[in-house]
Image (cartoon, rainbow, N blue to C red):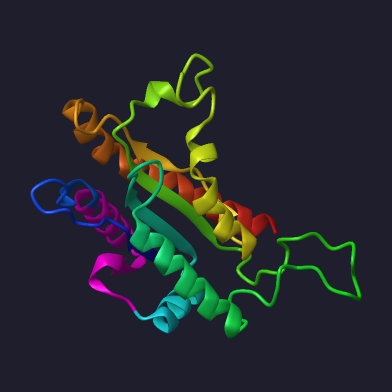
Amino acid sequence: MKVHLLNAHLTYPNWSEGTLNKAMAEKAVSHLADRGHEVTVTKIEDSYDPELEVRRHLEAKLVILQTPINWFGPPWIYKRYVDEVFNAGLHSKKLLDNDGRTRSDPARQYGTGGHMHGRGFFTAATWTAPASTFSNGDSVLFEGKSVDDLLLSVSTNYKFVGYTLLENYGLYDVFRDTTDVAAGIEDYATHLDKQLAALDGSAQSS
């Protein structure tokens, strides 16, 4: 299986150097390669070619976004990446033709015009927030909202062009709980295996 991994970390010298997201990306690449999968990696901060990124999306069965969560979303360079790459895929009609609606079929739903069915996507994120604050009705900040709720603006881009959304993965409280962070990097391999199995199962049933 071909996998495309996006590293969206944005370096802030002497504050946020990207070592944790790099470690997670390296864990994914080594684990997937050991199991015979072909992995391409784009570190967005180091520049990219939108047309090449469209091709990599077309070639990959699975796309993984590796990202820190800065002010409740990925760094701004990821939004630029999405704008440029998905627009390129729209203009060439390789990722999608339109939003799904047509004059000849007005009942067709918005968001059904994608070409990327049979592929999967998930986000692997690093959070300063503790896991206990999500899906918690007592949370003053999130008021019961889940991680998936907060990542909706990320995942919907992929669902819009036809991807199956897989289970997200997170490392939480990364500045305070280093023991759980280290264990979380090791557990990431198990998560990867589960998502690959889920994707393979969905492809066989379709």
Give the residue at x 50% y 19%: 136
Give the residue at x 39% y 66%: 4
Q: Residue furthest left?
A: 14
Image coordinates of residue 102 in percent, x first then y, are 84, 73
Q: Is residue 64 above or below residue 57?
A: above
Question: Which quarter of the rendering shows the N terminus?
Answer: bottom left
Image coordinates of residue 107 in percent, x first then y, are 89, 62
Give the residue at x 64% y 74%: 96
Q: Is residue 26 magenta?
A: yes
Q: Residue furthest top?
A: 138
Q: Is residue 178 visible?
A: yes
Q: Quadrant of residue 47?
A: bottom left
Q: Is residue 2 visible?
A: no
Q: Quadrant of residue 109?
A: bottom right
Which residues are the magenta region? 22-48
Q: Is residue 166 above or below residue 127?
A: below
Give the residue at x 32% y 42%: 188
Image coordinates of residue 206 in percent, x first then y, are 70, 59
Numbered disc total: 0
Image coordinates of residue 61 in percent, x first then y, are 49, 66
Q: Is residue 59 above or below residue 143?
A: below
| Relative side of 9 to 53, left or right | left
- Give the camera-side residue of 88 and 54: 88
Q: Is residue 12 magenta?
A: no
Q: Quadrant of residue 7?
A: bottom left
| Relative side of 99 to 76, left or right | right
